Structures are given as structure tokens and as C-alpha cells.
Amino acid sequence: MKTLTAATLLATAGIFGLSGCASTGNITPQYVAPSTYQSYDCQALNQEYTRVNRYVNAARNEQSTLSASGVGVGVSAGRWGISPNISFGVGKSNNTKARDAKLSRLYGERDAIIQSARIQRCSFANGVKIYGE
């Protein structure tokens, strides 16, 4: 097993400080088999865990998408006379199904990485909770 440098330990501690425990809110993780990561060593698992957490944080911060709610065609009268008028109804969508599906997959990957790291007895996985713990 490779030894960890002070910089790696500091980065890992910072990640745990920022990410806290593995809270998923109301989103249930998809199942990802820990064997997916069985060929990874502890350093690679730690890097993958960090990468997945970055994606989780980015997905959590995604804004709702814009959605078209209608198109209007009409005639308006104003200072310059009568003219055609076209309007588009655009608003913020509360549909978060795509984001929730992405988060569900990412949570499943994160849990699988931690489970694989526990099997290999990687130190960075100590104290990290997975869904249901």
C-alpha cells in the first residue's frame, strides 16, 4: 500500500470538512456494485471519491431550467400605429427529475466507492457514511 503525503492528507481532510456526511436528502441512490471499483487502489479510490463529490456539489447547485409556457400572437396599437405583436412565455421550471436522476446515480457511485474502499481498508473511508447508515 502506498503512503500518503501530507498534501494528500490535507486535501482529503478538506474534502471531508466541506462535504460532511453523505446526505442525500429525499433522493435514494441507485445501486452501483462495489466490484465496479475493485481494480482501484486506495489512491485511485480517493481521487474518484473526490471527483464524484465535485459532480454531486455541481448537480446540487444546478438551477432549474427555463421552460416555454406559450407563444402569443396579437395586434397592438401604440404611438406609431397598429403593429403585429408576438410574445413568448418563458419561466422557470420546477421539474427537477433530470437533476434528481443524476444525483441518484452519483450517490450510488459514491456509496460503491466507499464500500470498495472499506473492503481494501483505505484510511480515507474511515468515518464516511453511506446511504442508510
Image (cartoon, rainbow, N blue to C red):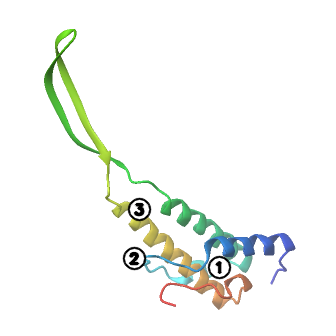
* Foreground residue among 116 and 95: 95
Label 3: which secondary element = helix
Label at residue 26 = 2
Q: Badge 2 local density, few (<14 within 10 Å), some, or many (20+)?
A: few
Q: Badge 3 local density, few (<14 within 10 Å), some, or many (20+)?
A: some
Circle 1 or circle 2, nearest the eye? 2
Amino acid at the residue labelled 3 = Arg
Q: Is residue 32 above or below residue 93?
A: below
Amino acid at the residue labelled 1 = Ser
Residue at 68% across, 71% down: 15
- The residue carrying mark 1 is 39
Q: Tag 1 or tag 3, which sits nearer the N-term?
A: 1
Label 2: which secondary element = loop
Percent from the top left, x then y, of residue 5?
A: 86, 74
Residue at far top of view = 80
- The residue carrying mark 3 is 99
Percent from the top left, x then y, of residue 123?
A: 74, 85
In the picture, the quarter occupied by the N terminus is: bottom right
Label 1: which secondary element = loop
Q: Is residue 21 left or right of residue 43?
A: left
Query: Rounded to the nearest whole Å, what is the CA distance between mark 3 and mark 1?
Result: 29 Å
Q: Is residue 82 left or right of residue 63?
A: left
* Foreground residue among 81 and 105: 81
Amino acid at the residue labelled 2 = Asn
Picture quadrant where residue 9 is located = bottom right
Q: Badge 1 local density, few (<14 within 10 Å), some, or many (20+)?
A: few
Percent from the top left, x then y, of residue 11?
A: 76, 69
Q: Is residue 78 above or below residue 91?
A: above
